Amino acid sequence: MCYEFKLTKVKKIGLILLSTVCALNLGAQKPIYQDTAQPIEKRVEDALARMTLEEKIRLIHANEIYSSWGVPRLGIPENHPTDGPLGLRPEMKWNAPVHEGISGDSCTSYPALVCLAATWNPEMGRLYGKSYSEEALYRNKNIILGPGVNICRTPLNGRSFEYMGEDPYLTSQMAVSYIQGVQGNHVAACVKHFAVNNQETNRADINTIVDERTLHEIYLPAFKAAVQEGNVWMVMGAYNKYNGQHCCHNQYLLNDILRKEWNYDGVLASDFGGTHDTKEAIFNGLDLEFGTAIDSIESYDNYFLAFPYLELIKKGEVGVKELDEKVRRVLRMMYRTNMSADKPWGSLASPEHADDARKIAEEGIVLLQNKDNILPLDISRLKRVVVVGENAVTKMSCGGGSSEVKAKYEVLPLDGIRNRLGNKVEIIYKPGYSSAVEPEENEKLRMEAVEAAKLADMVIFVGGLNKQPDQDGESWDRKSYELPYNQNELIEELAAVNSQLVAVMISGNAYAMPWVKKVPGIVQAWYAGTESGNVIASVLVGDVNPSGKLPITFPVSLKDNGAHVLNAYPGDGKKVEYKEGIYVGYRWIEKQKIKPLFAFGHGLSYTTFKYGNATVNKKNMHDVEGLVVTVPVTNVGTREGAEIVQLYVCDDKSSLPRPVKELKRFSKVRLAAGETCNVSFSIDKDALSFYDPELHRWVAEPGKFQFLIGSASDDIRTKVSFELE
Ligand code: BGC
C-alpha cells in the first residue's frame, strides 16, 4: 500500500509554527557537547552525561564490519575506519570483508610502508599521511587503520611490506611522521598491531614469549613513540597472546604500559576478531570491539562488549566506571576527527596524490648493486632491450589482505619502461616464468626469454615476490626464503647469455640471491604504488638519483637470522619464544660477525659521498644535555644526490650485554655536486640507554660510548668517542 502524504490546513499551520520555533531557537545557546568553542574534554563529559546506558554500550562496538555506532538521538555520527596503511580499502558489504563492488572507491595506491621506511625521510612520512588522509576524508572515513609498526623479526613474515623494517628507531621516526600527517587532517591514525605480532603463522592464538628487556628495546619503542611523540588517537591490539593473554585485552600491555606508563588517552580498538572475553575486555583496556564473527545483523548485539557487557552491568556484577572511561575515549577520538569543526574536505585519486605517491616511491627505491656503473642506462647506446619477468606486467596494489587497494591506476613496470625508453629503443617482453602454470610450461617460457636475451643489448629482469598465497600477504608467512617459480634458475641463465643484466626486484621483504655475483645491477623496488612503473623507469635511466636505503637486513640465508638459527620461529603452534632476544636483524648479524647479502642501511647512489671526521662538542659530561655530534659530508660526484647519514651508538662496556651498534640518529641530506654540509646530531640520554629488566626502566650507565657514523650499518666511515661520567 502506498502512503499518500497530504497536508491538511491544520497540519500546515502546525508546521509553520514549528519551523518558526526552530528558527528562533537557532539563536539559542548550543548544548556544550555540540559547541565547537568548548574544549574537547568538556564536550566529552557533557555528551557522556546525556547518554543512556544502552547508548554507551552501543558506542563501543561495531555495527557493520567497517563501522561502529554513533548516538543518533544526539546527532553523534558513526565511526568509519578504513584499511589499511597503504591507501583506502575498497568498500565492503556490511557483514563481511567482501567487496561491495561499487564504483567511486578507486583511489591512489601509496607505496608499501617498507618502501616508505626505505626513504629514511620523515618528510616523506608526513607527506604520505597528509595525502592519504585527504583520500580518507573524501570517502568519509575518520580512521585509517595504519601505520603498521611490527618489527621485522624474520624475512618470512607475510606482512612485512605493511611494516617499517627491523629497527625500532627508524620505525619510530617514520611512524610518528606518518601519524602527524594523517592526524593533521583530523583523521585518526590507528597504529597496529600492539604488540609482538611478528608472524602470521598461527597469529590468532599463538602465545608470544618475549623477555622484558627485548620487549622494551625492540618491540615497544615504535608504539611508545606513536603515543608520546605522534600523539596517536587510536591503537589496535594484536591477534596473538603475550605471556598467555590475548593482546586485545592484555593487562600488562594495555593497562600497565599503554595507559599507566605512557599516559595514552586515545582508543584501544581490537583487531578484527581479536576479542575473546567480556570481562577481560572490560577490565584490561579494550575500548572498541571490531570484527567479532557474526551470522546476522543482530549478531553485533552479541559482541563481547555489547549485550554480554550490558547484562553484567544490569546484574550488578560490574559497574559503569570502566564503561564511562571507554566511552570517553571513543568520544574524544570522535571530537578530534569526524566531530571536529576543523575537519577539511578531502580529495580522491587526484593528480597531486599520484605525484605524492611517486615522490615517496622515488625516494624509497634502493639501488642495491651497480657494478661497472651499469646504471643509469645509457639510452644512446641501446637498440634493443628485453624485459623479462612476470612482475613486469603484474599489478600489485590489489592483493595482500587488508592492505589491498583498488588503485585508480597502477603503472606496470613494463609500461613505465616503454613510456620512458620506447620511442628510442626497441622493447621486447618475455615472461620468462609464470606463477600460474605447470613447471614444464615454465621451462618453455624460460627458454624463450633466454633466447631473446641473447640478442639484446640489455636485459631488464623484473621479478621477486607477489601478493599470492605464501608470498607477501596477510594471514600467511612465506614458506621459503628462495624466490618462487624457479626465478633463480632463470636469472642465472639470463646472466650466462647476457652480461648486461639488471634485476628490478619487487617484494616487501628480503629473499635469497644465489646469483648476486652474476648480476651487475640490482634495484629493490618494493611495491611502489600507483606510479610504480614510471618510478622504476626514472631510476633505471637516472632521471631520479636513487637515495633509498634498506630498512631490513638481507641475510644470505635464513641461517644468518637469529630467530631461525635458534629454531625460535614459528614456534610449536601454541607458543613462540623469541630466543634471539634483542639480537634482531643487523643486531644479530653484527654480534655473530656475519657478512650479510646486503646490510641494514645499505643503498647506493649515482653519485659518491665522502665523509670527513666526526667531532663531538663535549668529550665527557655528567649528563648529556647539549651533546652534539657533527660530521661533514661532501658530494664528490658529478650530479646531485641525497645521502642518508646514519649514527650508531656503541656502548664500550656495560653491565648487560649490548648490541655491537644500534641506530640512534639519521639524517637525509640532498647535496649538489661538489657541495659539503655539516650534519649535526643532538644526542640525548635515551640514545645511550638500555632497558634494565631488574630495575624495570631505561638506564644510561657511566662509561665510554662511541658514535659510529656511516653510510650503512656495515659501512662506518668515521667515529668519535664520548664519556658519560
Ligand atoms: C588485520 C588488521 C586490519 C583488520 C581490518 C585484520 O585482519 O590484522 O590489520 O586492519 O583486519 O581489516
Image: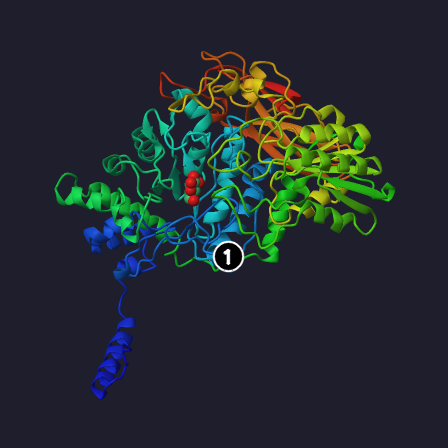
**Residue for badge 1:** 105
Q: Give how far across and how far down residue 594 sits, in percent.
A: 61, 16
- Way the structure is coloured: rainbow
Q: Is residue 255 left or right of residue 547?
A: left
Q: How many numbered marks appear?
A: 1
Mark 1 neighbour density, 10 Å: few (under 14) some (14–19) many (20 or more): many
In this view of the protein, can residue 602 be seen by the observer? yes
> Does the image show residue 544?
no
For this orientation, the residue located farthest to the left is 315
Quarter location, residue 524: top right
The residue under the point 28% across, 49% down is 299
Residue type pointed to by label 1: Asp
| 158 or 436: nearer the viewer | 436
Residue 196 appears at what percent x and percent y? 42, 29
Above/below status of 540 relative to 209:
below
Is 520 on the left or on the right of 332, as rendered? right
The image position of residue 96, as x and y in percent, is 39, 49
Residue at image point 48% right, 17% down: 567
Regarding ligand 1, which quadrant of the image does it lie in? top left
Is 18 in front, or is 361?
A: 361
Vertical side of 409 occupied by 123: above or below: above
Q: Nearer the viewer, residue 286 or 44?
A: 286
Left or right of residue 227, residue 280 in this image:
left
Residue 21 drawn at (x, y percent): 24, 76
Residue at far bottom of view: 9
- Whether ligand 1 has any atom under 8 Å from the Cβ at mark 1 is answered as no
Up/down of 26 relative to 278, above or below = below
The local secondary structure at tag 1 comes to loop
Q: Quadrant of the N terminus?
A: bottom left
